[in-house]
Image (cartoon, grey):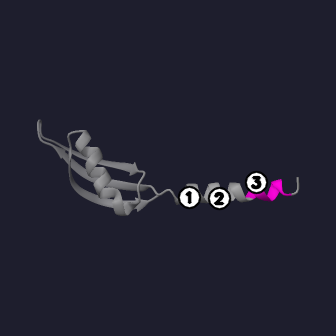
Amino acid sequence: MTRIIPTLAATLAFTLSAEAAVAACQVEYKAKRENPFELFYNVTTLSVPCSAAEGALRAQLAQQGLTLLKIMSKKEK
């Protein structure tokens, strides 16, 4: 019984630190759609580090028929 508590505590600490290591990036951006022409401004949170946010955002927007114009800001969450 005395070995179970430290083992559980270590497991819990490892799980919490692993969750903290999962990066998220809040991105403020401008995008456009061609037909019909529309401009968009939005803020979204991506489940990637900010260093990979532009590529992930371009892919996400392309699925919606949008083209990324400019990333206004990025912030780690």
Q: Residue at x 65, y 59 (%)?
A: 14
Q: Residue at x 63, y 54 (%)?
A: 15
Q: Which residue is mark 2?
A: 14
Q: Main secondary structure of the magenta part?
A: helix
Amino acid type at mark 3: Leu
Callout 2 touching callout 1 (CB < 8 Å) = no
Task: Depth check: give the residue in front, 1 or 14.
Answer: 1
Q: Quadrant of residue 55?
A: bottom left
Tag in front: 3 or 1: 3
Q: Secondary structure at mark 1?
A: helix
Give whichever of discs 2 and 1 has the lower sequence position. Answer: 2
Residue at the extreme bottom of the image, as rendered: 51
Q: Is residue 60 above or below residue 23?
A: above
Amino acid type at mark 1: Ala
Residue 24 position in % (x across, y down): 44, 55
Q: Which segment did they paint magenta?
A: 3-9
Badge 2: residue crowd in 10 Å (few <14, some 14–19, many ≥20):
few
Amino acid type at mark 2: Phe
Q: Which residue is mark 1?
A: 20
Badge 1: residue crowd in 10 Å (few <14, some 14–19, many ≥20):
few
Residue 77 position in % (x across, y down): 47, 57
Q: Secondary structure at mark 2?
A: helix
Q: Is residue 46 magenta?
A: no
Task: Depth check: give the residue in front, 41 or 11.
Answer: 11
Distance, label 3 to label 1, CA atoms, is 18 Å
Q: Which residue is mark 3?
A: 8
Residue at the extreme top of the image, as rendered: 36
